[in-house]
Amino acid sequence: MQDFFVFRDYLCIVFELMDGSLYDLISSTERGLPLDLVREYIRQILEALVTLRSSNIIHCDLKPENVLITN
């Protein structure tokens, strides 16, 4: 996290720019992702959601375009 601010009563969080998104990765393959990679991404996403919940933060737009990844 690099910064945060409130805009129209919403907390906005600024993160570093990553290499791409999960959507970019899925779109770049014709046969899909390997199952072990899918499991790892799901594990990390669920861990993040648990952390958000314990901090009373709601992510209102969870989708592959908003899951940022690095190589």
Image (cartoon, grey):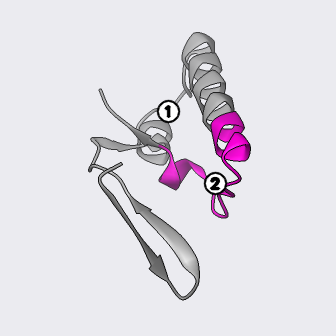
Tell me the tag on residue 22.
Answer: none
How packed mark 1 is, by other alpha carbons closer than 10 Å (few <14, some 14-19, many 20 or more), is few
- Classify residue 56 as left or right of residue 63: right
Give, as a three-letter code, the residue at label 2. Leu
- Residue at x-position 29% and y-position 26%: 71
Give me the disc on residue 30: 1
Q: Earlier in the sequence, mark 1 or mark 2?
A: 1
Q: Position of residue 46 (x, y in %)?
A: 69, 31
Q: Amino acid at mark 1?
A: Glu
Q: Is residue 66 magenta?
A: yes
Measuring 69% from the left and 58% from the top, which residue is drawn there?
Answer: 58
The x, y position of residue 37, in whole percent, is: 54, 17
Residue topped by disc 2: 62
Q: Which residues are magenta?
A: 49-67
Horizontally, is 45 left or right of 22 in the view?
Answer: right
Q: Please tell me whether residue 28 is drawn above or below residue 8 in the rendered image.
A: above
Position of 47 with respect to 26 (left or right) is right
Q: Secondary structure at mark 2?
A: loop
Q: Nearer the viewer, residue 32 or 5?
A: 5
In the orientation shown, which residue stands out farthest toward the top? 36
Where disc 1 sits, the SS reads: loop
Residue 27 % position (x, y): 47, 43
Q: Nearer the viewer, residue 35 or 67?
A: 67
Q: Where is 12 relative to 40, above or below? A: below
Q: Residue furthest front?
A: 55
Q: Residues within 10 Å of mark 2 (few under 14, many from 20)?
A: few
